[in-house]
Image (cartoon, helix red, strand yellow):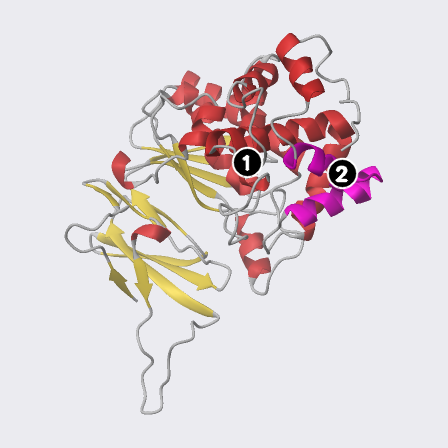
Amino acid sequence: MNLDTPGPGEESHLGFASDAFFLPAQGWAANLLPARGIFATGGVPPDKWNLTVHVPNGFVVHTSGDKMKTSKHGEETTVHARQRIVDIYPYVIAGRYVSKQIGSDRQKIYLWTRNQQDAGDIRAVSDSLIKTLGNYNLVFGERSVAQPPAGFLAWHHNRGQNGLPLWLAECPVTPGCFTERNPLNAQLLGTKDEGRSGEMISLDSAVIDPGPGLKKMALAAAPALAASWLGYGQSSGFHEQDPPLSAFPAFAAAVGDEALNSAAARMETIRRALALVPKNAPPPGKEDAAALQAKSFLFFYALQDRYGQETFRKAVRHMLDARRNTDFNLNDLIAAFDQEAHGNTAAFVRLWMKHPGVPADFRTKYENNSADKNTSLKESTP
């Protein structure tokens, strides 16, 4: 295999430092070498192929695919990893990292940092991550694959049986690891003034910027980790949905935030989003992008209120499991809630998405805080 890297003046997401490097899927192109022989043909990727990584001794290596063999020759270590069709986003991260296994027996987390960290900080970040991941499991279901594609079972076996392990590695060079954060989602989450903090690079791996401090890492990485529970690396349309599902990743990130903050976090998040939707909003189709995204974001809180937390969890899990390896859209969401709630979810969607602004009773409830936040939103006639 050869690597194509960006030419002069082209944007690069490669992260190289003297003691570590990162090759994300969007920063390099894997060119499979042509087959040998007189009648060799090409153009179609094979079912499986090998990725070989050569690094200095002392480097730890994490890649996509199945790690098959590691060998040492003189001052060099070679790692062979088998890539399959399911490894649609090949990546490599390696370096002289300090590796710590944190988390729990049920949820193993491997934390790679450039320097040795204080034991107290390690415990704090472990506890925070367990809370965050536990909340994701509670709302979105276990981070696993219900209907694995061909070739996935061996991958899943190597990655772990009781919930996929998670790798978090410090970015070698901060500008080289992160794509631009969606400014509207950052505004909804109250992080618009913070730097880039985490980037999901596969279903089970993320790079992080520990700049804000290791103790805050779980909160900073929550938006990236949310992507793993919602199908990153399995659904090609994960980041390309139409409203209201375009706000689903931001809502999932807010779920992680609520796990780490006070009970008032949900109320604060909703009020922040409400402020972005004018009370005298223009009709659908004429709303500005920020108002439409905020309205879509609030729609998921309205679903929780309308159907209750438990039905919301069951319906979301049903949709994600049923569409685990394909795109999902609004019709899939409606079908899942119809099955779990036995109601006319389409009418509730029209009430929210086909009328100006947000329903008056929802705005009154959260702006005035006159009702308990767990009370179900009264059904209105579309």
Determine the residue positioned at 69% across, 49% down. 332
Magenta-highlighted stretch: main secondary structure? helix
Determine the residue positioned at 58% across, 36% down. 284
Please say if 379 is above or below 286: above
Please say if 8 is above or below 4: above
Label 2, label 1: how far apart the Cα atoms are: 20 Å
Residue lying at the far bottom of the rendered structure: 38
Graded by Cα atoms within 10 Å as few (under 14), some (14 to 19) or many (20 or more), the crowding at tag 1 reads many
Residue 109 visible, this orientation: no
In the image shown, does 127 or 12 lie closer to the viewer?
12
Task: Residue under label 2, please give it.
Answer: 347
Amino acid type at circle 1 is Ala
Amino acid type at circle 2 is Ala
Dot label at residue 290: none
Residue 171 within the magenta-colored segment of the rendering: no
**Could you tell me which quadrant the N terminus lies in?**
bottom left
Task: Residue under label 1, please give it.
Answer: 247
Mark 2 or 1, which is nearer the eye?
Answer: 2
Residue 177 visible, this orientation: yes
Residue lying at the far left of the rendered structure: 8
Give the x, y percent position of residue 99.
Answer: 38, 35
Give the x, y percent position of residue 4.
Answer: 25, 61
Please say if 286 is above or below 71: above
Q: Secondary structure at mark 1?
A: helix
